[in-house]
Amino acid sequence: MATINRGILDGFFGKVGTVVGSFWKGIPVMRAYVRHIHDRKAAPQLLVRARFTALVNLSSAFLSAIRIGLRNAAASSRTTESNVFTKKNWAAVQATGADTVTVDYSSLTVASGPLTGVLFGTADFDTPQQVEVSFESNEECDKTSLDDLVYLFVYCPDAKGGILSAPVKRSAHSVSLMVPAYWGGMTVHLWGFTLGDGIDNAGTLSDSTYIGSGNIG
């Protein structure tokens, strides 16, 4: 409510309709009233928040992979690997409700760079608690080396955890890792990427490849 001391033409203090009166250094001033809406339950905001939360949780589970795979992109952007992961993968996560989020795992990026990576084959789940993927070295491409390092990353949505393999050389033609016993029967998703370790390409990264999914034996 406004207070007017000497009639409608005098300066006033407070809100009248869509304007607010006040005094600045003894001078009466008037400004438009701006209505601030703090509805934290607004549907669009909830959907954005749900997507962001899902990506933050994913980046935490993927941290062992993106610390290597996205470190160059993070350094060039002067930000963190988690921030790069969130930005690159925003479109891969959709929300239809505050608690209903879908992830297109095949579109997720866990590594980024200009290096030519290896050509991954199909994942082998025949050995209990183990995932193995063969690959073609692809060393005939420019700026590659048989000493380049190949990584395999496995993520289990039910366990909300991921594991990064120890690196193998491009010349090894296969990479594998062991997973926890309690992952038995659970579905996992796999990505691979290559890190340059030759004379001319040390530290250079390839884009990640989504290898596919399967159930742990």
Image (tube, rainbow, N blue to C red):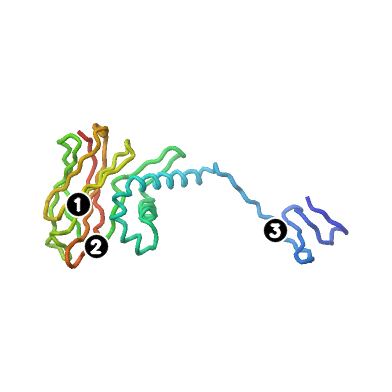
Which tag is nearer the camera, tag 3 or tag 2? 2
Of all residues, the one furthest to the right in this rendering is 6
Where does residue 155 sit, x and y in percent of width and height? 28, 42
Callout 3: helix, strand or loop? strand
Which label belongs to residue 84? none
Residue at image location 16% in from the left, 40% down from the top: 124
Return the residue at label 1: 167
Residue 32 in percent (x, y) is at 70, 58
- Tell me where residue 102 sits by quadrant: top left
The residue at the point 24 percent across, 51 percent down is 209
Q: Does dot 1 land on a helix, a strand or a loop?
A: loop
Mark 3: few/some/many CA within 10 Å (<14, 14-19, 20+): few
Tell me: 188 left or right of 126: right
**Considering only vertical position in the picture, is 119 above or below 203?**
above
Mark 2 nearby-residue class (10 Å; few <14, some 14–19, many ≥20):
many
Q: Are marks 1 and 2 in contact (CB under 8 Å)?
A: no
In the rendered structure, the answer to whether residue 139 lies left or right of residue 97 reads: left
Q: Nearer the viewer, mark 1 or mark 2?
A: 1
The quarter of the picture where the C terminus appears is top left
Disc on res. 204: 2
Q: Amino acid at mark 3?
A: Ala
Nearer-N-terminus badge (3/2): 3
Residue 207 or residue 198, whichever sits in front = 198
Determine the residue positioned at 25% across, 59% down: 205
Q: Distance of mark 1 from mark 2, alpha carbons?
A: 15 Å
User: What numbered label is drawn on residue 32?
Assistant: 3
**CA separation, marks 3 and 1?**
63 Å
Lower sequence index among marks 1 and 2: 1
Q: Earlier in the sequence, mark 3 or mark 1?
A: 3
